[in-house]
């Protein structure tokens, strides 16, 4: 059946880069932000940040703080939704996947990016759509 769209929202949020779940010593320049548009269950986000230091945390690279929790792509599964980088610098190659409120960064071949993938001047521009868990 068809549903009437009852929710529309626009806003901002602050994406945060973490390595292994920690943000120790990570600092940003003048760019660290996100904007979103929500229409019903669909959310379109744009993220931008530029590092001035990647800090000392180690582990897998994850962007936290998405504005809504991602719903499962297929009912009763926990498949991640793919995102696309529109620009990145200081990274060799990258792809992004959202699950929950976190975006996991990986190589195009599927290996997780880590602190070793970033430099003190890496920057990320990310845009994508996802369906939220509930309306």
Image: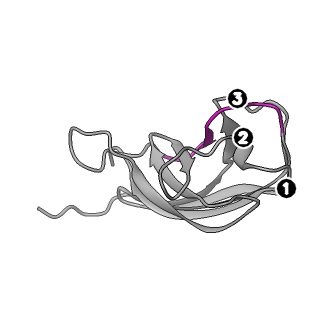
- Residue where numbered disc 1 is placed: 121
3D distance between C-alphas at marks 1 and 3: 18 Å
The residue at the point 56 percent across, 60 percent down is 36
* Label 1 or label 2, whichever comes before in sequence order: 2
Q: Position of residue 60 (x, y in %)?
A: 61, 37
Q: Is residue 45 above or below residue 113?
A: below
Left or right: where 89 falls relative to 98: right
Which residue lies under the disc numbered 2? 115
Q: Are marks 1 and 2 in contact (CB under 8 Å)?
A: no
Q: Position of residue 125 (x, y in %)?
A: 67, 64
In three-dimensional space, the C-alpha distance between marks 1 and 2, rounded to whole angstroms, equals 12 Å
Question: Which of the marked residues, 3 or 2, is nearer the chain's N terminus?
Answer: 3
Residue depicted at x 60% and y 42%: 65
Per the model, the C-alpha gap separating discs 3 and 2 is: 11 Å
Q: Is residue 17 above or below residue 36?
A: above
Task: Kindly identify the residue that appears in the image at 33 percent across and 59 percent down.
Answer: 6
Disc 2 crowd rating (10 Å Cα; few below 14, some 14-19, many 20+) is some
Query: Relative to 56, is 71 on the left or the right?
Result: left
For marks 1 and 3, the one nearer the N-term is 3
The stretch of residues the image draws in magenta is: 55-68
- Specify whether 10 is left or right of 56: left
**SS at badge 3:** loop
For disc 3, the neighbor class at 10 Å (few under 14, some 14 to 19, many from 20) is some
Q: Check disc 1: other Cα within 10 Å, few if <14, some if 14-19, many if 20+.
A: some
Badge 1 element = loop
Q: Which residue position is annotated with label 3?
A: 22
Corner quadrant of residue 7: bottom left
Tell me the chief SS of the magenta region.
loop
């Amino acid at each position: 059946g068809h549903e009437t769209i009852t929710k529309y929202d626009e806003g901002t949020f602050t994406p945060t880069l973490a390595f292994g779940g920690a943000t120790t010593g990570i600092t940003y320049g003048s760019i660290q932000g996100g904007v979103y548009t929500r229409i019903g269950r669909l959310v379109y986000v744009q993220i931008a940040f530029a590092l001035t230091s990647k800090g000392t945390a180690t582990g897998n690279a994850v962007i936290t703080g998405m504005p809504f929790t991602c719903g499962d792509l297929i009912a009763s599964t926990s498949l991640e939704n793919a995102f696309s980088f529109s620009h990145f610098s200081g990274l060799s190659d990258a792809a992004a996947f959202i699950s929950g409120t976190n975006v996991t960064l990986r190589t195009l071949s599927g290996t997780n990016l880590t602190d070793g993938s970033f430099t003190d001047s890496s920057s990320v521009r990310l845009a994508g759509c996802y369906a939220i868990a509930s309306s």
